[in-house]
Amino acid sequence: MSKRSVDMIFQAMYSLTDLRVLLRETAPSHAFDAGQRAQAQRLLENLERQVGSLKQEMLK
Amino acid sequence: MKCGNGIEARQVDEIFINIDPIQAGGRLTADAMKAVVAYGDGYSVCDNCRKPNRLDFISKPPIAEFHKDVARWLNMDAVRTVPGARRGFQAVAQTYVKKGDPVLLTTLSHYTEFLAVEEAGGVAREIPATEQKLVTPDATAEKIEAVTKEFGRAPVLAFIDHVDYQYGNMHDVAGIAKVAHQYDVPLVYNGAYTVGILPVDGKASGADFVVGSGHKSMAAPAPSGVLAVTAEREKEVFRTTSIIGDVTKRKFGIKEPEMMGCTLMGVTLVGMMASFPHVKERVKRFDRELANHKIVMDALLSIEGTTCLSEYPRKHTMTRIDTIKSFDTVAESHKKRGYYLQSALEEKGITGVIPGATKVWKFNTYGMTTKQAEHVGRSFVEIARENGIAVKG
């Protein structure tokens, strides 16, 4: 297992943490404004990329 | 969802707007949450502990620098991190209070200040607050005179809460410190509700010691806090050990007895450190917090019979409110009795009011967005109307 896998685990958890904070900031409705929607989109795309890298690293 | 055997994952702040009076300032920042993930293991901050082997000397992660930064930020000369403000009170009391010594507290002091005095063998003497629930320099002078008459000597220490936990009122610490110093009484500034919430200048306030709470007001995990001191007091509270084992002849270097060696390790310290840059910025925006608080206050005070028991206009975001003549009138006949208010709030996505409380209770709006403050204010008004309570305007 590589250092890259470990980094990806942390980065993925950090993306999720930023999403968690977004949920806190918009509680209880979680209705996003345009800026929050863009932020959520960017974080989710990062997360997909990070999980994709993890699949490559861990399942190769 | 469980996060361990029988441990429910806590999602309070994701699902609700949390107005619990003591939880608002301790909610973690995103960076603190990330630090908690990375530093959860017990001795995680000790990987690079080198001689002289003390927590506040570790440079990786930058713990030593953090201590210096906090001291500068509070305009004090030295800082140690402590497991909660109470441990800061305890360290100071253990240093200065001997059996039978009188110690000044106030009628609004937190119980942990009393316990710190008790443990050191001191005798508590309270400065009475005014009818407006404010502790004043005049009342301080009167109490010191009375104590001096009673004990034949002045109090050895004074604990003053800048903002008290009961009403969230702001007391004239600088004026009180000036009076205390006229009698050579060192002053502990209790900043549990201010350090990390609003700007604090230790020296300008005249404090000999500034105590802050990480988990209450610095967006840090519990138990955490800071004890900051002036240069004059540093060698006293942070004195180093001198004990020697009779058989082994062991000594313990620069460990500090009042700190019991190293204090905060792992998540508590690193969480506080990770939040610190954000905390330094947020205290500059306290006016926005007060503006959001006003939105909720205005809504509450528009409900007939509701009164504010804290000083008004508000100088802090934690407030004590009296709803005996508003929400409590419904509790008598409501099928959920006093629990209806908490239940109605939760239906609107708001939590943090003590279950069953409809008479006198506290809330805190710190950290809310304006949108959330508007939702909270609107919700109180809606609940009042839904239950037949008159609303002004």
Image: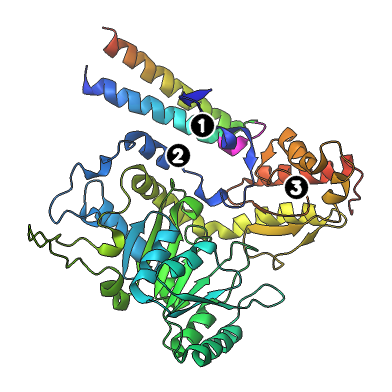
Which residue lies at the image location 48% right of the left edge and 76% below the top edge? B123
Q: Residues within 10 Å of mark 1 (few under 14, many from 20)?
A: some
Residue at mark 3? B377
Which residue lies at the image location 45% right of the left edge and 27% below the top edge? A16
Asked whether residue B237 is in view, the answer is yes
> CA gap, disc 2 to disc 3?
27 Å
Q: Which residues are magenta?
A: A24-29
Q: Is residue B185 magenta?
A: no
Question: Mark 1 belongs to which subunit?
Answer: A
Nearer to the camera, B230 or B355: B355
For the residues tagged 3 and 1, is the chain the same? no
> CA gap, disc 3 to disc 1?
24 Å
Residue B323 vertical position relative to residue B61 in the rendered view, above or below = below
Q: Quadrant of the image for the N terminus of chain B?
A: top right
Residue B25 vertical position relative to residue B123 in the rendered view, above or below = above
Residue B31 relative to residue A2: left or right: right
User: Where's residue B60, x and y in %?
Assistant: 22, 46
> CA gap, disc 2 to disc 1?
8 Å
The numbered disc on residue A20 is 1
Which residue lies at the image location 65% right of the left edge and 63% below the top edge? B167
**Callout 1, which amino acid?**
Arg
Which residue lies at the image location 63% right of the left edge and 57% below the top edge? B318
State yes or no: discs 2 and 1 in contact (Cβ < 8 Å).
Answer: yes
- Mark 3 or mark 2, which is nearer the start of the sequence? 2
Residue at mark 2? B30
**Callout 2, which amino acid?**
Ala
User: Where's residue B216, x and y in %?
Assistant: 50, 53
Q: Secondary structure at mark 2?
A: helix
